[in-house]
Image (cartoon, rainbow, N blue to C red):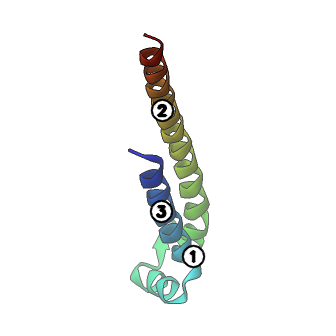
Amino acid sequence: MTRKTLYTISAIVYIALLSLVTVPPITALIDRVKPHILGLPCMQFFLIFVPLALAVWLIIWYLMEVRIQDREAAEAEKKEGQKHE
């Protein structure tokens, strides 16, 4: 996975999660589908769920970014090693 792909996926995740609590047609639909989730009114559940989901996504994003950075560093080191030979 490249950084550009990771950033694109992140943008989609953020837009999707934030639209759950900010876009009026979606919030109206959520409140009609099932009135309670885990004992909370539906909108209240999503007000708790969205920040938690975003926090989890930031952790995942960080870990993926570290992997990409390590891979790029290894490739750069390999190219540097080939130049000196």
| Residue 40 or residue 65, whichever sits in front | 65
User: Secondary structure under badge 3?
Assistant: helix
User: Residue visible at 47% across and 70% down?
Assistant: 16
Position of 65 relative to 75 (above/below): below
Q: Amino acid at mark 2?
A: Glu
Whether residue 38 is visible: no
Query: Could you tell me residue 33's position as x and y percent?
Result: 40, 82
**Mark earlier in primary sequence (2, 1):** 1
Label 3 Cα neighbours within 10 Å, binned few <14 / some 14-19 / many ≥20:
some
- Which numbered dot is residue 72? 2
Question: Which label lies toward us, 3 or 1?
Answer: 3
Q: Position of residue 68 (x, y in %)?
A: 47, 37
Residue position for label 1? 21
From the image, state whether disc 2 or disc 3 is nearer to you: 2
Relative to 49, say whether 23 is above or below: below
Q: Position of residue 21 (x, y in %)?
A: 57, 76
Q: Look at the numbered discs 2 and 3 and tell me whether their residues touch, using CB distance below 8 Å.
A: no
**Front residue (pair 24, 84):** 84
Q: Position of residue 29 (x, y in %)?
A: 44, 86
Res 85 visible: yes
Few, some or many C-alpha atoms within 10 Å of disc 1 (few <14, some 14-19, many ≥20)?
some
Closer to the eye: label 2 or 1: 2
- Disc 2 to disc 1, C-alpha distance: 37 Å
Specify the quadrant that holds the C terminus: top left
Q: Amino acid type of disc 3?
A: Val
Q: Residue at x 56, y 71 (%)?
A: 18
Relative to residue 36, is residue 60 depicted above or below?
A: above
Q: What amino acid is at disc 1?
A: Val
Secondary structure beneath label 2: helix
All told, the count of numbered labels is 3
Label 3 belongs to which residue?
13
